[in-house]
Amino acid sequence: MYRGSPFTRFAKWTSHAAGHPAAFAVAVLIVGAWALTGPIFGFSDTWQLVINTGTTIVTFLMVFLIQNSQNRDSTALQLKLDELIRALEGAHNAMLDLEELEDKELEQIRQRYEELARRARSEMRHGHKDTDVEQVEVGDSTSEGDVRRP
């Protein structure tokens, strides 16, 4: 079930390998070797073309692999959040697929939540609880990270 297509497996493996410190070290070594060969080739146009072409090709191909990984990660994250919304009593199931809305609709919802947050912070400053869990202090009276028990 979790194997995926050959491309997906290759994209995952490449993404993991490219993010490893050893991949960076190999890239530095390649660039270093190229730079050291400059005097040998008289810093010619061909010598410069080698590194330019090589890095362009690698960058071009990596864009697609990275985008594939980001798409998968984004989809998985959205599904996890959708499941949390779905399972949480009192949550609005209409929020499940917000990423499908138009920008104007998203902006309206964002503004509504910003207003809710402003009101909640104002209430907290006046000593009211925001939830039935530990209260986070807002304002100058405590340092960041201090928590007041209800």
Image: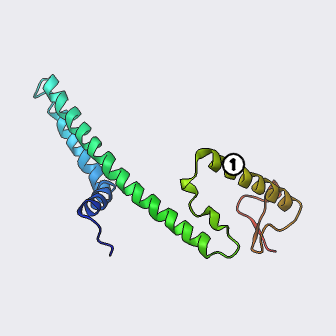
144 and 114: which is toward the camera: 114
Q: Nearer the viewer, residue 94 or 139?
A: 94
The answer to whether residue 54 shows anywhere in this view is yes
Q: Is residue 43 visible?
A: no
Left or right: 54 as drawn, with respect to 68 = left
Name the residue furthest left: 40
Pointer 1 local density, CA inside 10 Å: few below 14, some 14–19, many at least 20: few
Quick check: 48 left or right of 75?
A: left
> Relative to 109, does residue 84 appear above or below in the rendering?
below
Q: Residue at x 20, y 34 (%)?
A: 53
Q: Quadrant of residue 19?
A: bottom left
Q: Which residue is mark 1?
A: 108
Q: Position of residue 17 (x, y in %)?
A: 28, 58
Pick out the residue farthest to the right.
Answer: 126
What is the three-letter code of the residue carrying label 1? Gln
Please tell me which residue is depicted at 55% across the width and 71% down the height of the picture.
83
Q: Position of residue 70 (x, y in %)?
A: 41, 55
Q: Position of residue 79 (x, y in %)?
A: 50, 66
Q: Nearer the viewer, residue 99 or 16?
A: 99
Disc 1, SS: helix
